[in-house]
Image (cartoon, rainbow, N blue to C red):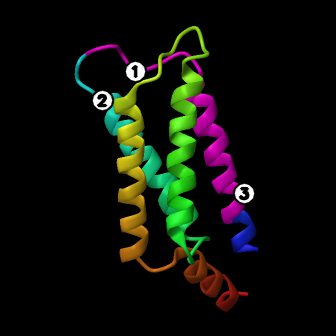
Amino acid sequence: MIHRLWRVCGWLGIVITLIVSLMPPTLGNDDTHLDKIVHLFGYALLMFWWAQLVTQRRWKLALAVVVFGIAIELLQGLTPDRLPDPLDALANSGGVLLGWLAARLSPNLVNRFAVLFAVHR
C-alpha cells in the first residue's frame, strides 16, 4: 500500500514538474538566479523521491531524470513564453546529483513507512 501511494505521488510530482515547466514563468526575470535554486531543489526532490523506490542501479534512474530535465528544457523552446536555458538543465542535473546523494546517505523511507504502518495495524 505504501509503495503504491509513494509511486502515485512520484508520478504526480513528474506531472506537476512538466506542467509548471511549460506554463508561463511565474518567477521574475531578474538576475538573482532564483529559478536555478528552484530547479536544483525541485530535481533533487524528484530524484530523492524516486530513489526511495528504485534502490538497484540508481544510476539508470538518475540518467532518466536528467534526460527528463533536458527534454523539458527543449520543450520550452516550443512554447510562446519560455526559452530553453542550458543553465536550467545544468541546475536540474545538479539537483539529480544532490537527490541521489541524499538518498544514498539516508535510510529507505518507503520501507520504514511500510514497517511503521504494518506495526500500527
Residue depicted at x 40% and y 20%: 27
Residue 27 got which mark? Answer: 1
| Vertical relation: 15 (above or below) 10 | above
Name which residue type carries label 3.
Val
Q: In whole angstroms, how far apart are the C-alphas of marks 2 and 3?
A: 29 Å
Which one is earlier in the sequence, the residue at label 1 or at label 2? 1
Report the magenta stretch's main SS: helix
Q: Position of residue 19 (x, y in %)?
A: 63, 30
Which one is earlier in the sequence, the residue at label 2 or at label 3? 3
| Vertical relation: 19 (above or below) 52 | above
For this orientation, the residue located farthest to the bottom is 119
Q: Position of residue 113 (x, y in %)?
A: 59, 78
Q: SS class of the residue under badge 2?
A: helix
Q: Which residue is mark 2?
A: 34
Q: Position of residue 45 (x, y in %)?
A: 47, 54
Q: In whole angstroms, how far apart are the C-alphas of marks 1 and 3?
A: 28 Å
* Residue 17 among magenta residues: yes
Name which residue type carries label 2.
Leu
Q: Which residue is mark 3?
A: 8
Q: Is 62 in front, or is 33?
A: 62
